[in-house]
Amino acid sequence: MPVLPDPEDTETKALHDYADFTGKRVLEIGCGDGRLTWRYADRAAHIVAIDPKVEDIEIALEDCPDKLRHKIEFCAIRLEDLEIPAEKFDLALLSWSL
């Protein structure tokens, strides 16, 4: 039997309980393959999603829904190397990245 991550969508509900992504410029640190990105991207104004693993970013780019491509920048980079000022973002999201 295949394992379905979060079949009750609990993670998504919790995410939206803690943050309002509507119209926000989001920095997602440790986005991996975009697993979490798709759960809020439709509400955000713009997203910079970063992860140091090139392979994960390639998967995220491949899996990115066409309707979201215009608002998400996926970058294979470490946070320490990101050269975008913090004030360019309204919200930072870090999940499973420690």
Image (tube, rainbow, N blue to C red):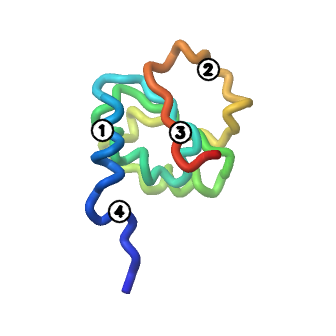
Label 4, label 2: how far apart the Cα atoms are: 32 Å
Viewer-side residue, 70 vs 23:
23
Compared across the picture, whether 74 is left or right of 80 comes to left
Percent from the top left, x then y, of residue 21?
33, 30
Earlier-in-chain disc, 2 versus 3:
2
Label 3 to label 1: alpha-carbon separation: 14 Å
Amino acid at pointer 4: Asp
Q: Earlier in the sequence, mark 4 or mark 3?
A: 4
Indicate the position of residue 50 as horizontal and vertical percent values.
Answer: 58, 39
SS assignment at label 1? helix
Q: Residue at x 42, y 23 (%)?
A: 25
Instruction: Point out which mark residue 56 bears.
Output: none
Q: Tag 1 or tag 3, which sits nearer the N-term?
A: 1
Numbered badge on residue 6: 4
Q: Residue at x 44, y 36 (%)?
A: 72
Distance between mark 4 and mark 1 Cα atoms: 15 Å
- The disc at residue 84 is 2
Q: Amino acid at mark 1?
A: His
Residue designated by label 1: 16
